[in-house]
Image (tube, rainbow, N blue to C red):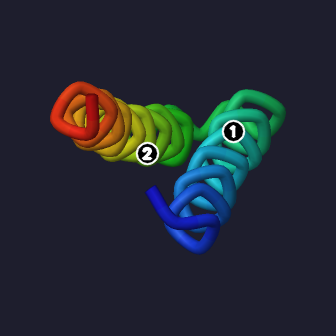
Amino acid sequence: MGIGDKIKNAAEEAKGKAKEAFGDATDDNSLQAEGQVDQAKANTKQAGENVKDAWKDTTRD
């Protein structure tokens, strides 16, 4: 996985956490849920990248 993908996924997760926190602070359930969705998307992308990395590692040996 490239460093750019790692940065993008981390940024998306941080954005989601910020949205969730802001939604929690303002009692905005919609924004809170949107933040949770953003975090889930970032985690899913990260998991996919980890699978790719694992596959590359096993095929190199």
Q: Report the residue at 25% width, 42% height from top.
A: 56
Q: CA distance from mark 1 to mark 2?
A: 11 Å
Q: Position of residue 16 (x, y in %)?
A: 59, 46
Q: Pick the quarter of the image with the C terminus.
A: top left
Q: Amino acid at mark 2?
A: Ala
Q: Report the residue at 43% width, 45% height from top.
A: 42
Would you name the residue on which mark 1 appears?
17
- Neighbours of disc 2 within 10 Å: few (<14), some (14-19), many (20+): many
Q: Position of residue 11 (x, y in %)?
A: 67, 60
Q: Is residue 1 left or right of residue 49?
A: right
Q: Are marks 1 and 2 in contact (CB under 8 Å)?
A: no
Can residue 7 be seen?
yes
Closer to us: mark 1 or mark 2?
A: 2
Give whichever of 3, 34 is nearer the camera: 3
- Neighbours of disc 1 within 10 Å: few (<14), some (14-19), many (20+): some
Is 61 drawn above or below residue 17 in the view shown? above
Mark number, residue 29: none
Is 14 drawn above or below residue 58 in the view shown? below
Q: Is residue 51 left or right of residue 32?
A: left
Residue 37 lies in what quarter of the image?
A: top left
Q: Residue furthest front?
A: 61
- Of the two numbered discs 1 and 2 on the same chain, state the one appearing first in sequence: 1
Q: Amino acid at mark 1?
A: Lys
Q: Report the residue at 41% width, 40% height from top.
A: 46
Is 1 drawn above or below residue 25 in the view shown? below
Can residue 33 be seen?
no
Mark number, residue 42: 2
Q: Position of residue 2 (x, y in %)?
A: 51, 66
Q: Secondary structure at mark 2?
A: helix
Q: Position of residue 27 (x, y in %)?
A: 68, 31
Q: Residue furthest bottom?
A: 4
